Amino acid sequence: MSETTAAGFESFVETQVLDAWKGPKKVPHEEYFTSGHRTCQGCESAQIMKLMAKAAGPRTIVLGATGCMYVANTTYYSTPWGLPWMHTQLGSAGSAATGTAAGLKALMRKGKMKNEPINVISFCGDGGGADMGLSAISAALQHTEYNHLILMYDNESYANTDIQVSGSSPYGANSTFSAPGKVRRIMNRRWKKNTAAMLAAGHPDCKYVATVCTSNPVESMNNVRKALSIGGPTFIHSLDPCPKGWDYDPRFSHELGELAIETGIWPLYEVEEGVIKMYGKSKRILKGQLKRKPVEQYLMRQGRFAHFIEEDIAYFQSKIDKMWEEWLIPGVIPFRGE
Ligand SMILES: Cc1ncc(C[n+]2csc(CCOP(=O)(O)OP(=O)(O)O)c2C)c(N)n1
Ligand code: SF4
Ligand SMILES: [Mg+2]
């Protein structure tokens, strides 16, 4: 989409219009993230890379911040990327997105490149996005004149450096920096950062923000396609079960993603041009059509919570109940007016 601002500048380069795929049978076979990586078995962060690349298609440039999705995907002489791909520094997903989109726009304006829609996607992990690169993402989401999507893959730890706690790690999770001890059982006492909602609420010009989970692959791809079609700065936050960091058998990755949604710990929603809408099972939970499962069913499937006792589970459950029952927008916006 193209738009002219009050100052008369053309605000957007044309975007590709990528229609939603109506069901798995409509999804094409072509892959742009294939074999050749060495992520762990059952890695859902690799899965969102694959879905993101498939959804975006061949006219796409991908920038990737340091983390598992850089290191495990760029072994010397081997790569799964079937798209142009470039590494960027750990906290730089936002600046890489803006810089690349601006560069493409300038080259096209000067006639040095054919003027055509090219998708720019910059990705980062939760450490690189919710913590270290938050300021660069914030700046990127204010630059309405450039088309790009920032996708944060959230495995809930600094996984690549051996599972350190991040601002996106859940309360109480065992990590190499928050191992439970005999004196203190709960070492990470911080509640998970509410990144997608924070970015949506704080950047009113950002055209599109969504949460996704690869347990819903078609919806996740359609959200990527929608973000790229809308253009301007957009942001997607993906929750990715990580067998190594969460400590479970890799075959349960999709099941855990599903449980995160069903217990209400991971609400699925889109914020499009300032309008929020829940989708999938989260929508049904919101409407009272689906009862949230007890969070214990999600926590006790993962070794990182194996040290939890009843009071820890009860505390966790009370926080989720509060999210859905007391927040201004259930599951999304915690504060309320007087
Ligand atoms: C400035 C900087 N500090 C530290 C590192 C070391 N480092 C490399 S990957 C990584 C973990 C990043 O975590 P996250 O962004 O969540 O991605 P994940 O590894 O979980 O995929 C760290 C700390 C680095 N590369 N650059
Ligand atoms: S540690 Fe987690 S995110 Fe990293 S490659 Fe393994 S499963 Fe994927
Ligand atoms: Mg991470």
Image (cartoon, rainbow, N blue to C red):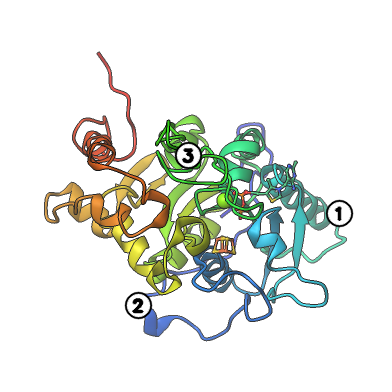
Which of the pair 143/316 is nearer the observer?
Answer: 316
Query: How many C-alpha atoms fall within 10 Å of the one at disc 1: few (<14), some, or many (≥20)?
Result: few
Ligand 2 shown in quarter: bottom right
Q: Secondary structure at mark 1?
A: loop
At a point 46% along the width and 38% down the height, the residue shown is 181
Read off the residue under disc 3: 195
Read off the residue under disc 1: 110
Look at discs 1 and 3 and give the one toward the viewer.
Answer: 3
Q: Quadrant of the C terminus?
A: top left
Extreme-front residue of the structure: 182
C-alpha span from label 2 to label 1: 41 Å
Which of the pair 112/244 is nearer the observer?
Answer: 244
x then y, percent, for residue 2 = 59, 51
- Locate residue 130 relative to residue 248 in the image: left or right: right
Do the CB atoms of the residues marked 1 and 3 lie less than 8 Å apart?
Answer: no
* Label at residue 23: 2
Say what amino acid the circle numbered 1 marks.
Answer: Lys
x then y, percent, for residue 167 = 52, 37
* N-terminal-most mark, 1 or 3: 1
At a point 27% along the width and 36% down the height, the residue shown is 323
The image shows residue 116, relative to residue 317, as above or below, that is below
Q: Secondary structure at mark 3?
A: helix
x then y, percent, for residue 171 = 40, 38
